[in-house]
Image (spheres, rainbow, N blue to C red):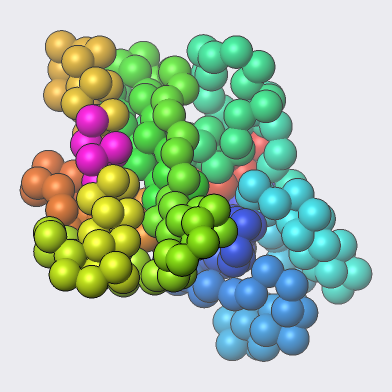
Amino acid sequence: MIPDVVVDVGNSRIKWGRCSGGRVAEVAVLAPDDTTSWQEQRRLWDLSGPCAWALSGVHPLQRDKLATWLRQRNEAVLVLETASQLPLRALIDQPDRVGIDRLLNAVGARCRVPEGTPLILVDAGSAVTVDWVDETGAFRGGAIFPGLRLMAQALRDHTALLPLVEVGKTSPPVPGTSTAAAIEAGVFWAAVGGINSLIEQLRSKSARVPVVFFAGGDAALLATAFDAGIQLWPTMTLEGIRVAAEAIP
């Protein structure tokens, strides 16, 4: 299938990618359950004629709602939901129970580097995932921990007095001189420290230097705290959906 539009359905938002020239050429971020905004985006992208859509994501109910909405409009819809649908070897326990977004990141990233290049894939959204793709192109698993908003929300929900703080600054200063500033610094640098530690451990898995890609809603915020060796790639998951869809006749 050659998709006209690819869609990544996350826990808090939906990302549409309009495909052109063998790549994701344009991206729109939409509410996960607002059919009015969906219809408006179709109009803006002039998707009035029959189109091919490839959908995936970590929120099955919202994904299937969008798939039904599109099929009601006579669109061709492919839903990617299992590891067996993807052009990827997953050398892990129970591949079909791994978050499909993590596998799709690997599918997309493998097409962006020379054969034999190991990869570290960081996706910073509601959760942060840090995954390893070895020199043979096989997905080998990784690590998952709470993202910035979940960490901040947990402090608010499980203490008596701490406020809910939005982490919106890059590299907040330490020490924080107020409770809110201390929370913002703590959450930000905890995420940076966790990612950095995992990257260093994964780098030790190969004699070759891995390419490190950053994606996800908080990637740009966090990437400023890392050296120039990382590559910010906001459309990594969408590109994985496109490549996986094109591999299916």
Asked whether 149 falls inside the magenta stretch, the response is no
Name the image quarter holding residue 179: bottom left
164 and 159: which is toward the camera: 159
Q: Residue at x 59, y 87 (%)?
A: 44
Instruction: Using the image, determine if residue 18 lies above or below residue 151.
Output: below
76 and 171: which is toward the camera: 171
Quarter holding the C terminus is top right
Left or right, residue 15 beside residue 198 = right
65 and 25: which is toward the camera: 65
70 and 158: which is toward the camera: 158
Instruction: Using the image, determine if residue 96 lies above or below residue 14.
Output: above
Q: Residue at x 40, y 56 (%)?
A: 148
Q: Position of residue 1 (x, y in %)?
A: 66, 47
Could you tell me what secondary structure mostly forms the magenta stretch? helix
Asked whether 196 falls inside the magenta stretch, the response is yes
> Which contiguous range is marked in magenta?
192-197
